[in-house]
Image (cartoon, rainbow, N blue to C red):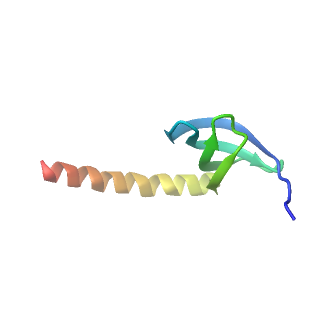
Amino acid sequence: MKQDFKYEIINNIGVISENNTWAKELNRVSWNGNEPKYDIRDWSKNHEKMGKGITLSEEELRSLKKILDEEIKLLDEEASNDD
């Protein structure tokens, strides 16, 4: 049995990538009227269809940022060593 759920995109924070029909976006989304969470997933251009994604609390978003900052730092160091 398919269960219906409701969602509301509170803030469109940014597009990570896109093609002709889908866009991977970072948004704040309220699911079923709950407190909005940060959400990364593919959306159709009209936001009527969505792919699988992940939702993050503010604490998880901040933790992810720290991890990504460290990874980007390593990537930048590797790139400068290749020069």
Point out residue 18 in the picture as x, y percentages from the top left corner: 51, 39
- Front in this rendered view, residue 66 or 9: 9
**Image-based side of 5 in relation to 15, left or right:** right
Q: Where does the image place residue 23, in percent across and percent down from the top left?
A: 56, 40
Residue 38 lies, in percent from the top left, at 63, 48
Q: Position of residue 2 (x, y in %)?
A: 85, 61
Left or right of residue 68, residue 27 in this image = right
- 30 lies left or right of 15: right
Residue at point 58%, 41% (across, down): 22
Residue at 72% x, 37% y: name it: 10
Closer to us: 76 or 5: 5
Could you tell me which residue is drawn at 64 percent across and 40 percent down? 44
Placement of 25 over or under 56, stated as above or below: above
Most extreme residue toward the bottom is: 1
| Numbered disc total | 0
Direction left: furthest residue: 83
| Residue at 83%, 47% in the rendered image | 33
As rendered, which of 81 and 69 lies closer to the eye?
81
Report the front residue among 8 and 71: 8
Picture quarter containing residue 59? bottom right
Q: Quadrant of residue 1?
A: bottom right
